[in-house]
Image: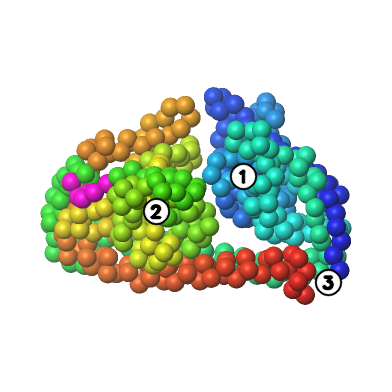
């Protein structure tokens, strides 16, 4: 396959970064215009954003519009953010840590640019400006980036192969969401509408949570937790002081982990004492205690399954802004407890236990343990619920494993297709 060498700027109609409206001005936010931050480039294909801005916010800031089919790159950001590449499925405004690129589609297919850059993550990070404290990828360096590309027809053939993998992954993600909704609906049927097995024979009595079955109890959340501890971050390099290898999961990674997308969780090295105290076991819960946005409260959680741990070689801890929670299984089913946490989050009851300073939302975890109520059904009812949703979560794990394999196959093909070694 014949390839031709270009500089990236020869293949683009436009390249620009954006800006952020003043966060202290509420009139600039919660409008009708999507606004993308660099952290959201963890999604490969982006249709919606976590934040929206107003027309006034656009006019009073340096934010700029990126259009549908543009390729965007995080040019700065913490952790693995810098160098992440996404493809836009809709128009949206961008912040100063995002670079948007519009291709000249007569010579460069936008999806080809997306796949080409996504396969050059380490190279892009290596081109960062060393004079910046966080490091940054500049438009100046990007414009000079060498691009070896085939003709437009071959580009289309290559992207058709790669997008087929991403479409299969997305279909699996949609199925996972439907299955999660099924489990959530069963939880609501049993424990919000109280139509659990045998409910017809149960008397209802008043309580601080409203009318409940007389066989249910109300306790404080802290009374059912056997063990909890904050997470860690470790170091990038193996050393005598940091000998324990383990992946680190953050709140932003929770959706990916559920879907079998593992590459956002960095592999780092930890002190033995820190790792031994923080290593996840099956049925532990990772709980987010810092971060969040106005649209997305802090307090997301994920229940760690055996097969999830297997995908991380049984070496997983949570990050510093999370807590490991281990339930006392004599008092509460971990699966039931996880759904209770989901209920608190989705109803935004969880917001009662968060505080905000300097733009960061923090969770008052100890206060939450002492003050937040937990409804406890009889053990046999919790066990029946866990057994009823087990096939659902088994299928979620099956789909997540399929995703992991599809990602591996796609990423193996990508460099061969981009180099021309694999004919199409």
Q: Is residue 323 visible?
A: no
Answer with mark 3 or mark 2, whichever residue precedes in sequence: 3
Sort mark 2 into few (<14), some (14-19) or many (20+) by Cα contacts within 10 Å.
some
226 is within the stretch colored magenta: yes
Main SS of residues in magenta: strand
Q: Quadrant of the N terminus?
A: bottom right
Q: Picture coordinates of residue 118 (x, y %)?
A: 66, 56
Instruction: Tell me where residue 183 appears, x and y as whole percent.
Output: 36, 63
Q: Read off the residue under disc 2.
A: 244
| Residue lying at 43% horizontally and 27% vertically, measured from the top left | 357
Q: Are marks 2 and 1 in contact (CB under 8 Å)?
A: no
In the image, residue 187 sits, relative to residue 268, either above or below, namely: below
Q: Secondary structure at mark 1?
A: loop
User: What residue would you read off at disc 1?
Assistant: 82
Q: Residue furthest front?
A: 240
360 with respect to 102 (left or right) = left
Q: Are marks 3 and 2 in contact (CB under 8 Å)?
A: no
Q: What range of the chain is rendered magenta?
A: 223-228
- The picture quadrant where one finds residue 187 is bottom left
User: How many residues crowd around disc 3 within 10 Å: few (fewer than 14), some, or many (20 or more)?
Assistant: few
> Is residue 117 in sight in this rendering?
yes
Q: Which residue is mark 3?
A: 1
């Amino acid at each position: 396959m014949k390839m031709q060498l270009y500089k990236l700027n020869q293949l683009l109609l436009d390249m620009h970064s954006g800006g952020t409206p003043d966060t202290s001005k509420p009139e600039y936010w919660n409008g009708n215009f999507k606004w993308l931050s660099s952290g959201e480039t963890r999604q490969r294909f982006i249709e919606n954003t976590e934040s929206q801005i107003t027309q006034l916010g656009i006019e009073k800031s340096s934010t700029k519009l990126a259009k549908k089919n543009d390729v965007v790159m995080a040019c700065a950001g913490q952790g693995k953010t810098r160098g992440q590449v996404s493809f836009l499925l809709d128009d949206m405004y961008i912040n100063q840590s995002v670079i948007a690129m519009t291709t000249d589609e007569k010579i460069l297919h936008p999806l080809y640019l997306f796949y080409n850059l996504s396969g050059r993550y380490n190279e892009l990070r290596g081109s960062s400006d060393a004079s910046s404290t966080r490091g940054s990828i500049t438009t100046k360096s990007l414009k000079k980036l060498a691009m070896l590309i085939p003709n437009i027809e071959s580009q289309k053939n290559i992207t058709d192969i790669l997008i087929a993998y991403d479409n299969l992954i997305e279909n699996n993600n949609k199925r996972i969401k439907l299955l999660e909704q099924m489990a959530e609906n069963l939880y609501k049927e049993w424990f919000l509408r109280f139509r659990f097995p045998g409910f017809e024979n149960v008397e209802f009595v008043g309580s601080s949570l409203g009318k409940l079955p007389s066989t249910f109890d109300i306790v404080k959340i802290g009374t059912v937790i056997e063990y909890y501890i904050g997470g860690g971050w470790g170091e990038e390099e193996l050393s005598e002081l940091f000998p324990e290898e383990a992946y680190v999961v953050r709140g932003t990674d929770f959706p990916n982990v559920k879907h079998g997308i593992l590459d956002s969780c960095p592999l780092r090295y930890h002190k033995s004492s820190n790792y031994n105290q923080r290593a996840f076991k099956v049925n532990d819960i990772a709980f987010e205690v810092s971060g969040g946005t106005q649209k997305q409260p802090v307090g997301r959680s994920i229940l760690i399954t055996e097969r999830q741990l297997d995908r991380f070689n049984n070496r997983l801890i949570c990050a510093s802004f999370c807590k490991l929670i281990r339930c006392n299984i004599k008092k509460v089913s971990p699966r039931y407890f996880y759904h209770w946490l989901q209920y608190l989050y989705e109803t935004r009851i969880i917001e009662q236990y968060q505080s905000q300073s300097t733009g960061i939302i923090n969770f008052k975890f100890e206060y939450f343990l002492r003050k937040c109520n937990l409804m406890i059904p009889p053990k046999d009812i919790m066990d029946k619920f866990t057994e009823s949703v087990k096939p659902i979560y088994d299928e979620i794990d099956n789909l997540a494993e399929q995703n992991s394999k599809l990602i591996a196959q796609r990423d193996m093909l990508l460099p061969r297709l981009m180099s021309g070694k694999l004919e199409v």
